[in-house]
Image: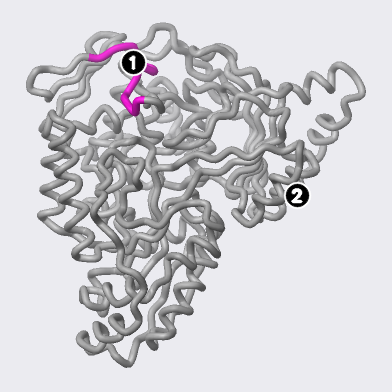
Amino acid sequence: MRLWLSGLLALLLAGCDNGNRQLAAESLLYCIEGAPLTFNPQLVTSTETLDATAHQLYDRLLDIDPNNQQPVPALAMSWTRSEDSLRYRFTLRPGVTFHHTAWFSPGRPLTAEDVVFTFARLMDEQHPYHGVSGGRYPFFDSIGWRELIREVRALGDSEVEFVLTRPDASFLSNLATDYAVILSAEYAGQLLAAGTPQLLDQQPVGTGPFLLSQYRTDEFIRYHRHPSYWRGSARLNQLVFDITPKSSKRLAKLLTGECDVMAHPGTSQLSVIRRHSDLALSQATGMNVAVLALNTEKPPFNDIRVRKALSLALSREDILHAVYFDIGSLAESLLPPVSWGYHPNLLMPLPDMARARLLLEQAGREQGFDMTLLVPAGARTFNPDGLKTGQLIQRRLAELGIRVRLLSLEEQILRRELIIGDQDAVLTGWSADSPDPDNMLRNLLSCQAIAAGTNASRWCHPLFERQLDQALTEPQLSSRIRHYQLAQELAYQDMALIPLVHSLKLQAHRTQVKGLRLQPYGGVAFHQAYKE
């Protein structure tokens, strides 16, 4: 039983005196679908983890301006780049304070030592914290961070320098992603001395607008505002993430006022939300894609004719209508039209069962075959209902004699299966947290992303890698676009992934909640939120 939440709800709804009204005005309950896997976003690519941590507990050196899609100052006030584009120097913002929690009292503000610690952990396999919590950093591993960064060093307390092995036009954007959060070296040192380094990722300390107060596993997360936050203290005193897996239950809580904001409303629920005058619906174009990934290392999916046959059998229109309720657009390639690297001349073919059967016959698979399709349990930003999508795919492929077994897995188990790499196929996708095309293309299809578990098709093509790498060395945007378009052409021709749908980002909230902003990139943020 969620006794604490029930008690808080009673206080929020009572409103019988000034004290309770003040508590209600300064507290916000956010209904989310799942629990975070960790309190350090560097360790996972889980949406639930990013939402619960990246913009609540932490900051990054840089942010992305949603209007012009360019990096802007955050913990770093300014930066310079050497003429050869191999050295970047960042000047840190003075007086930035870490959280004061029940488990840590900071003895100093943010310094270059914290930045060096944060990124050295990712790079150096001999670092005392590298292997803590498993030693995997999926985002950074997939973009080849260890091969890119030669050194990170402090030049005094307020200046830090990154030395690169090669020019990289995505470097600044990567420092602005949800994964590039800055940790406390002082806190890490205390934990190491105490013999409990694993607590760094379980009992977090950051510089963000909120600090962790209490976490009851699979029930709720309670945050309190960080009173010395460098951007200005949040107007909310308490922020509670109420973990409610079922979308129907989240909607019920929103309707009754038990929750103020609802994450990932189902597309089938939008008409209900719109009918209630005390509810508001926000939507924004997201940099995302849902895909069907066939394991290209495993028969029969290592045969391009089989991959093309499956793509011809699918009705993406049915998926868009039945799963997304037409809230989104068909994906012709991996990058959506809002991306500056979008390829306008790629078009997925219309369903053609006759052509699909011919390709299977040419591949010697005219009798069909058995396969298992892994689907993520619950909703994702890029796919509101993986199981329903899987069922639609199952029905279409049955017409070709392909017998599809659906296996629904929780995020952590699914990620483990993808790292092992013995799956037949998986419904997956990517929600980019930067506008740079490299963020999506490299994580979905690069050779390094196979070991990280984000390249679920396990497709590795040297020419594709070369296009991505050359795009990073080009100073002109037009040249970068051309390389990314050539990379998309290679993936398209080889059917490395079957793109399905680009979805919209959705969020529902009660009308008295103000200051919410759906970010086009990355997770949710509540620093500016308040209640009237």
- Colour mode? one colour
Which type of secondary structure does the marked residue at label 1 adopt? strand
At label 2, the amino acid type is: Ala
Measured as percent of width and height from the top left, residue 398 is found at: 44, 84
At label 1, the amino acid type is: Ala
Where, by quadrant of the figure, is residue 93 drawn?
Answer: top left
* Crowd tier of the residue under label 2, counting other residues whose Cα lies within 10 Å: few below 14, some 14–19, many 20 or above: few
Residue with the most extreme bottom position: 367
Name the foreground residue: 401 vs 176. 401
Q: Distance between the residues labelled 1 and 2?
A: 42 Å
Q: Where is 237 relative to 423, above or below? A: above
Measured as percent of width and height from the top left, residue 513 is found at: 68, 28
The answer to whether residue 532 is magenta is no
Question: From this viewpoint, is residue 220 visible?
Answer: no
From the image, tell me which residue sits under label 2.
Answer: 252
Name the foreground residue: 370 vs 414. 370
* Mark in the foreground, 1 or 2: 2
Where, by quadrant of the figure, is residue 237 drawn?
Answer: top right
Q: Decide if residue 11 is on the left or right side of residue 284.
A: right
Span of residues in magenta: 68-79
Q: Decide if residue 297 is on the left or right side of residue 524.
A: left
Can you tell which mark lies on residue 76?
A: 1
